[in-house]
């Protein structure tokens, strides 16, 4: 990730994680990866992406089954 700036766009995050557009926006929209919305763009810190990766596969497996509040509580634990 050294080649990326400290704050990236969703498109850059897609490349970093090697995921598709829908998956990237799902991660941002449901708050799994924290972001800041400025106008129509989302900005994501590289640290947030690193925290997501260090949390492991569990977060991918459980997010679909969790309520929004449960996801928020889980994020607080890993960040």
Image: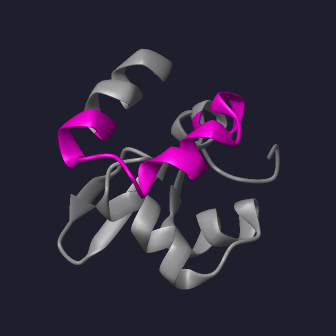
- Where on the picture, by quarter, is residue 72? top left
Q: Is residue 57 above or below residue 40?
A: above
- Where on the picture, by quarter, is residue 17? bottom right
- Residue at 35% x, 50% y: name it: 35
- Residue at 72% x, 71% y: name it: 15
Q: Position of residue 40 (x, y in %)?
A: 23, 78
Q: Is residue 38 magenta?
A: no
**15 vs 78, nearest the viewer:** 78
- Residue at 28% x, 26% y: name it: 73
Single out the residue that lies furthest toward the right. Answer: 2
Q: Is residue 43 left or right of residue 54?
A: left
Single out the residue that lies furthest toward the top. Answer: 77
Q: Is residue 66 above or below residue 74?
A: below
Q: Position of residue 68 (x, y in %)?
A: 22, 47
Q: Is residue 42 left or right of residue 39?
A: right
**8 vs 55, nearest the viewer:** 55
- Residue at 27% x, 35% y: name it: 70
By secondary structure, the bulk of the magenta-drawn segment is best described as helix
Q: Is residue 69 magenta?
A: yes
Single out the residue that lies furthest toward the front. Answer: 65
Q: Is residue 49 left or right of residue 30?
A: right
Q: Is residue 22 above or below residue 9?
A: below
Q: Position of residue 66 (x, y in %)?
A: 33, 46
Q: Give the magenta part as a residue range.
A: 52-71
């Amino acid at each position: 990730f050294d080649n990326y700036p400290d704050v990236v766009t969703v498109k850059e995050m897609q490349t970093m994680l090697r995921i598709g557009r829908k998956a990237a926006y799902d991660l941002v929209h449901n708050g799994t990866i924290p972001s800041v919305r400025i106008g129509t763009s989302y900005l994501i810190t590289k640290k947030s992406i690193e925290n997501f990766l260090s949390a492991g596969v569990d977060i991918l497996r459980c997010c679909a089954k969790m309520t929004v509040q449960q996801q928020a509580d889980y994020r607080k634990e890993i960040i």
